[in-house]
Image (cartoon, rainbow, N blue to C red):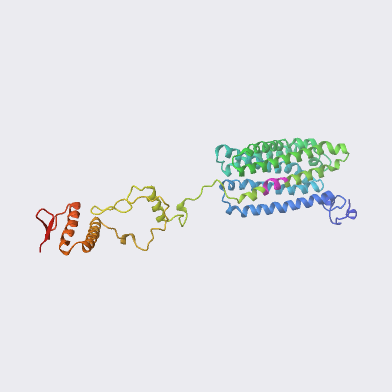
Amino acid sequence: MGPTSAPKGCGSSITSLYYNLCDLATVWGIVVEAIAAAGVVTSFVLFVILMASLPFVSHKKRKSMVILQASVLVFTLGLFGLTFAFIVGQDFTTCMARRFLFGVLFSGCLACLVMHGLWLALLERLDQGPRGWMMCLGALALWLVEVIINTEWLIVTVVRSPLRTSSISDLSCSIANKDFVMALIYVMALMLAVVLMAVPSLTHKHKQWRRDGAFMLAAGLFTIAIWVAWIVMYIHGNQVAGNPGWDDPTLAIAVVSNAWVFLGLYTIPEVCLLTQEDPDQEQPQDGDHVYPARSLVYDNILKEQEQPQQNIYIENKAFCMDEPTASKKPVSPYEVFNGQMRSGVYQPTEIALITKGLTKILGSQLKKVDRSIPRKSQCHAVMMAAVSLCVSTERPIPKYCAPQGNGTHFESRK
């Protein structure tokens, strides 16, 4: 079309190569363009969120998988950009981008998913998955295989083709639909590997890893369903319907829908689960806290209750007291705080106990004597109490009183 015959919605300065982006008669181009643009913005925002939340990730195992998730976002962003190559018209640049980037971008996303599934499988078996850089090297190796395949395919089909009098764009765009699909066999193998790697993760003993496996399995199954649909339409359906011009819309819709599957079923859930705490992480020890959970006094009381055979106070060779009996009732940890220091607590000795007992006995005997016995027999009562106490303590009888006669009468001496 010339500049004067531009379709409705497109300006006169726009070339015919970009008419599908603005032609109101071909609504599919505008719709797919809008969806792809929204996907580009969403992928960029998620990538920024992923990088910004990296310092706040406390889950060490999930943190090692961040680089794989970031790679999936980068390849998904490339898929949304590749959609525009299928919306615009065909020339040498767009045809080369379609043939080379279609398999390369899809293989990048699927390689990261395969390595994530392998990491989950090893985590189930070994309780510790490989390091993140090892998984990245594995994904890079799987991705480079498709890069090499597509590079060789382009060299064989374009460079070694015989030169024609027509434009060079015919060489890059004149590719049969079946040949285009056959060049993507390796990508289909990666899809199958994603599903096979995700299935064992569904029986993981931890719920968090089962969810990761479920997200990967859902993404793999939806990807396979989309690929089956567009391959059937691309190879057989459009020819049967008599509308071969729908080949480009078919590929554009397949790319943008599959890119949103990667975002909605894998990337967004993984970003949401990234900041969750590890339920299997060991609780910090008491020494890691600034303030311990229990005071030292409370710990000492518990130790004393557990080992009642040991004396609470330090033994002295001259004075010691009997071991305290263990209390059957629960002891409060604040019972020992009575306002006095431990060193200032009074501890009675045996001599103090004997003196206190002698005073009580003598006082009680004197009270009885004053009530019932005359004054002259007070010495008798006092002496009897003293003799009984001295005999019990193996001490000599005082000399201020001595028995007279047969021992029944006592006589006081000065």
Left or right, residue 400 beside residue 184: left
User: Splitting the image into 4 quarters, where does residue 404 fall?
Assistant: bottom left
Left or right, residue 236 beside residue 38: right
Does the rendering let one see residue 176? Answer: no
Confirm whether the magenta stretch covers residue 262: yes
Where 65 sits versus 10, above or below?
Answer: above
Q: Nearer the viewer, residue 370 or 121?
A: 370
Q: Position of residue 94 (x, y in %)?
A: 78, 46
Q: Position of residue 179 (x, y in %)?
A: 78, 35
Where 316 sits versus 221, above or below?
Answer: below
**Residue at x 56%, y 43% (from the top left corner):** 131
**Residue at x 18%, y 63% (from the top left corner):** 374
Q: Position of residue 210 (x, y in %)?
A: 63, 42
Where 370 sits versus 106, above or below?
Answer: below
Does the rendering let one see residue 117? Answer: yes
Q: Which residues are magenta?
A: 261-268
Left or right, residue 355 beside residue 182: left
Q: Nearer the viewer, residue 96 or 56?
A: 56
Q: Position of residue 194 (x, y in %)?
A: 67, 38
Count of numbered labels shown in the rendering: 0
Q: Single out the residue that lies furthest toward the left.
A: 405
Q: Nearer the viewer, residue 276 or 397?
A: 397
Quadrant where the C terminus lies?
bottom left
Confirm whether the magenta stretch covers residue 400: no
User: Splitting the image into 4 quarters, where does residue 153 fall?
Assistant: top right
User: Splitting the image into 4 quarters, where does residue 199 fall?
Assistant: top right
Magenta span main SS: helix
